[in-house]
Amino acid sequence: MTPNIHYENREIVGERIELTKGPIYWLGPDLTLRDCTVIISAAGRSLVPMSGQLIDCTIQAKGQLKAVVWAQMMLKGCRFKGRFTGHEFGFREGLVDTSRWKPGGIEHCDFSEAQLHGVGFNNCDMSTIRLPRWPCFTFLDPLRHAAELRRHAWPGLVGRTTIEVVCESTKETAAVTWHAPTIAEKKDTTVEELRAALEGVPGVVM
C-alpha cells in the first residue's frame, strides 16, 4: 500500500523539503512554507496541493514534473527550477472546490530558470511573473489574440494543434507557455521555423 505523507496545519520556515518517489504527498490544508527549498523527484500524480501558501520558496523539479494543478495554493515570491509540463497556476473556475477551499493564486514568481511546456497561468497579473525565455515562449492574454493567431501562418501541425489549444483558452487564462523543441519534435516542424513564425505575433513573449 502506498504511504501518504501529510504536510498540514503548520508553518515551516527555512527548511529543505524533499518529496521523493513513492509516497503520495498531501500539501495542506492550512500549510505555509516560507523561505523553504522544495526538491521534487516524486511524480506529479503523487502531489496533491490541497490548500495553503508557499512564500519566497525555491521549487526545484528533479526530472520532468508533469500535470500538477496548483489552483488551491497561493504562491508568492517563489523561484522555479527544472522541467514543468502541463501545470496550472492560479485560481480557475472549476479547478477549485470553493465550498471547501480558498482559491489560490500566483504573484511575483520567477520561472526564468525553468523549462515550461503546456503551462497555464490563470487570473493573475503576468507583469509580476518572470517568464522563461527562448526556447520557451509564452502567449499572453490568448483569448484576446485568438482571431489573429488563427489567421497567422504556422509551420507543420502547429496551427491545427497547439495554436487551437491556445485559442480555446478560457477568459481566466492570463498566459500559456510552451517549449519550442518539444513542439517542433511533435508537430512536424523545426525550432527555426517555429521561431520565424512567432516573430511579430501579438502577445508573444520569447
Image: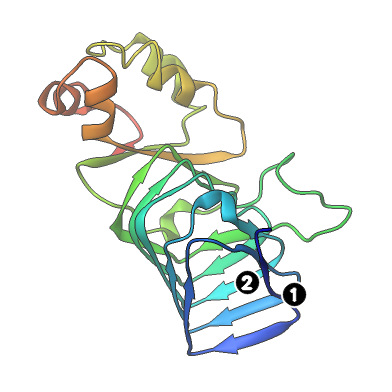
Image colouring: rainbow
What's the residue type where badge 2 is placed? Answer: Gln
Question: In what element is the residue under mark 2?
Answer: strand
The residue sitting at 46% across, 72% down in the picture is 77
The correct choice, above or below, for 123 with respect to 162 in the image is below
Question: What x and y, as percent, mark residue 1?
Answer: 69, 58
Residue receiving disc 2: 53
Question: In what element is the residue under mark 1?
Answer: loop
Name the outermost residue toward the left. Answer: 192
The correct choice, above or below, for 134 with respect to 78 in the image is above
Question: What x and y, as percent, mark residue 112?
Answer: 29, 59
Residue 64 is tagged as none
The residue sitting at 61% across, 33% down in the picture is 171
**Number of numbered discs visible in the structure rendering:** 2
Dot 1 or dot 2, earlier in sequence: 1
Question: What x and y, as percent, mark residue 41?
Answer: 42, 62
Residue 30 is tagged as 1
Few, some or many residues within 10 Å of mark 1 (<14, 14–19, 20+): some
